[in-house]
Image (cartoon, rainbow, N blue to C red):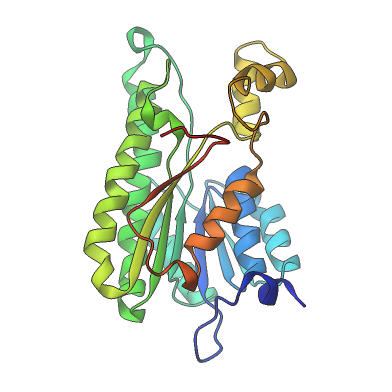
């Protein structure tokens, strides 16, 4: 039994494979989601800031059974987004699945946070999700089927030193619920995943910035997590897989916390 049969087919009734766009997919959660969607039977446009950084994920998607194209784009720039979606259409076909995962950190306490740190985080997370969703929805509406999965965070509930990130991730939740309302009549669902502590390069960079070893940082960060471990990118990818499937057709406008415990 191949991966597609095991996880449940995500093909059209006429046998064509669905096309997904995953942003911030060069590494970490985005790479895991892109690879999982390929195993589920999709072709994937792997989008990240620099096209050369997408090579490993493109290879993983191909190995998992999907066609892939790596695309360099700044999701906060309208022209980049339009070009990225046009290229996905040209090389893979019209996308009907979108995972808005691209994100950055510019942590600092409020009194030290600069205008640029605020604007950069809001632009990538929130403007990026808006621009990508606006560009992809036309293909979803035309197909009368679609899935949007936006990456929020437990930081949406508030986190010291992350006023910009928390605001962006809380905004993602409101944006998601509005997409669910507007796009639902066209067969398109929209949901958000809010990960907790996930062992990624982004988290490792945070530990380094604080002068901590990654192991010590994870141990402290997960001390109050009920399942007593950090999450893996694959934990988030498994939830994304379900939300992008046909089986999730009656799940929309939801925020699912993947955090090892009841965070919300």
Q: Residue at x 40, y 11 (%)?
A: 109
**Left or right of residue 263: residue 209:** right
Can you name the residue that lies furthest to the bottom here? 14
Residue 62 is drawn in which quadrant?
Answer: bottom right
- Residue 233 in the image: state x and y as whole percent: 63, 44
- Residue in front for this viewpoint, 46 or 147: 147
Q: Is residue 157 visible?
A: yes
- Residue 83 in the image: state x and y as whole percent: 41, 62
- Residue in front for this viewpoint, 160 or 134: 160
- Residue 8 in the image: state x and y as whole percent: 61, 74
**Left or right of residue 69: residue 18:** left
- Residue in front for this viewpoint, 260 or 2: 260
Q: Residue at x 33, y 53 (%)?
A: 131
Residue 248 is drawn in which quadrant?
Answer: bottom left
Quadrant position of the N terminus in the picture:
bottom right
**Left or right of residue 240: residue 191:** left
Residue 157 is drawn in which quadrant?
Answer: top left
- Residue 50 in the image: state x and y as whole percent: 57, 47
Exactly how many numbered labels are in the figure?
0
Q: Is residue 57 above or below residue 214?
A: below
Q: Is residue 215 above or below residue 89?
A: above
Quadrant position of the C terminus in the picture:
top left
Q: Is residue 51 visible?
A: no
């Amino acid at each position: 039994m191949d991966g597609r049969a095991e996880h449940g087919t995500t093909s059209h009734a006429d046998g064509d494979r669905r096309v997904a766009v995953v942003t911030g997919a060069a590494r970490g959660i985005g790479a895991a989601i892109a690879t999982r969607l390929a195993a589920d039977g999709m072709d994937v446009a792997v989008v990240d800031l620099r096209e050369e950084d997408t090579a490993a994920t493109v290879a993983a998607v191909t190995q998992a059974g999907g066609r892939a194209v790596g695309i360099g784009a700044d999701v906060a720039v309208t022209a980049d987004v339009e070009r990225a979606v046009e290229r996905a259409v040209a090389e893979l076909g019209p996308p009907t699945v979108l995972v808005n995962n691209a994100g950055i950190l510019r942590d600092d306490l409020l009194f030290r946070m600069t205008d640029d740190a605020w604007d950069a985080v809001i632009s990538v997370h929130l403007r990026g999700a808006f621009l990508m969703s606006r560009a992809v929805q036309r293909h979803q509406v035309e197909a009368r089927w679609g899935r949007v999965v936006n990456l929020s965070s437990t930081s949406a509930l508030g986190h010291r030193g992350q006023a910009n990130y928390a605001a962006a991730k809380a905004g993602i939740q409101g944006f998601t619920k509005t997409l669910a309302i507007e796009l639902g009549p066209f067969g398109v669902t929209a949901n958000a995943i809010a990960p907790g502590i996930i062992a990624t390069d982004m988290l490792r960079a945070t530990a380094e910035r604080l002068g901590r070893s990654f192991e010590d940082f994870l141990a402290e960060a997960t001390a109050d997590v009920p399942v007593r471990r950090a999450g893996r990118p694959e934990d988030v990818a498994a939830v994304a897989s379900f939300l992008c499937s046909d089986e999730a057709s009656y799940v929309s406008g939801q925020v699912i916390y993947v955090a090892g415990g009841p965070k919300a």
